[in-house]
Each structure stands twice: as C-alpha cells, then as structure tokens.
Image: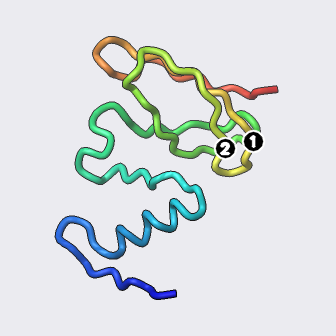
Amino acid sequence: MARRKLTPRAGGGAADADAARIDALYGLEPLFEPSAAGAAGDSARFQSVQCPYCGESFDAALDLSEPEANYIEDCQICCQPIEFNLQVNDGGTHVQLRVQRTD
C-alpha cells in the first residue's frame, strides 16, 4: 500500500490534516479553541461552576446563543453527570445558571 506524504500548505498544513484524520478515525469531535479568532464569537463564554457531587470547581463552556438551554455535562473532576439550566436575556448576556445533580 502506497502512502501519500502530506506537505504543508498556506492556511492549513500537515498538522491540521493529520488532526482531522485522527479525529475521523476515532470518531472524535473537533477541539474547541476559545482563543481562535472567530471560533465561537460572542455566543460562548466560560464560567466557573462547582460540582454538586464532589464540590470541586471547573470552567464550563456556556453557549449563550439560545435564550434557554437545559443539558447534561459530566464533571471534569469526578465524571458525575451534572444538569445545567441556563437562561439568557435578549442582549446575550448571562442571566442565570443553575447546576444540580441528576439523581
């Protein structure tokens, strides 16, 4: 089987192509880079939340593009499922975030 060598190109590069191939191979989602220009715009922000199970704090990405969102995200420390209830006003600023146990 012949292998094709990737050569870096302007705007992309071999590293980007390799990362995309690895993501596809293992079914991974693209990496969220908050510092990348235009990656999330003003619709995503990070906020420190405290896990209702282990009590540890971690930064969670909040999507402020919808007026209300309910979703479950695992704690980055103890991996327990946390229910997030996010309410956002019309201006797109964070209004209320409630985190609670799912049990």
Could you say which is closer to the camera, residue 34 or residue 10? Answer: 10
Few, some or many residues within 10 Å of mark 1 (<14, 14–19, 20+): some
Q: Is residue 10 left or right of residue 36?
A: left
Q: Amino acid at mark 1?
A: Gln
**Quarter of the rendering occupied by the C terminus:** top right
Could you say which is closer to the camera, residue 38 or residue 80? Answer: 38
Q: Where residue 93 appears, x then y in whole percent?
A: 34, 22
Q: Is residue 31 left or right of residue 83?
A: left
Q: Which residue has dot 2 on it?
A: 75
Q: Are marks 1 and 2 in contact (CB under 8 Å)?
A: yes
Few, some or many residues within 10 Å of mark 2 (<14, 14–19, 20+): many
Q: Earlier in the sequence, mark 1 or mark 2?
A: 2
Task: Give the quadrant of residue 51.
Answer: top right
Q: Where residue 94 appears, x then y in whole percent?
A: 40, 23
Q: Which residue has dot 1 on it?
A: 80
Q: In percent of the image, x 33 and y 80: which residue is there? A: 6
Task: Give the quadrant of residue 63.
Answer: top left
Could you say which is closer to the camera, residue 9 or residue 35? Answer: 9
Tag 2, which secondary structure? loop
Residue at far right of view = 103
Q: Where residue 85 appears, x then y in whole percent?
A: 58, 21
Could you tell me how far apart the alpha carbons at marks 1 and 2 are, in whole angstroms?
5 Å
Task: Give the quadrant of residue 70.
Answer: top right
Which mark identifies residue 63?
none
Tag 1, which secondary structure? loop
Q: In percent of the image, x 37 and y 53: which residue is there? A: 33
Q: Amino acid at mark 2?
A: Cys
Q: In percent of the image, x 70 and y 41: which residue is there? A: 55
Residue at far top of view = 90
For the rendered model, the colour scheme is: rainbow
Residue at far bottom of view = 2
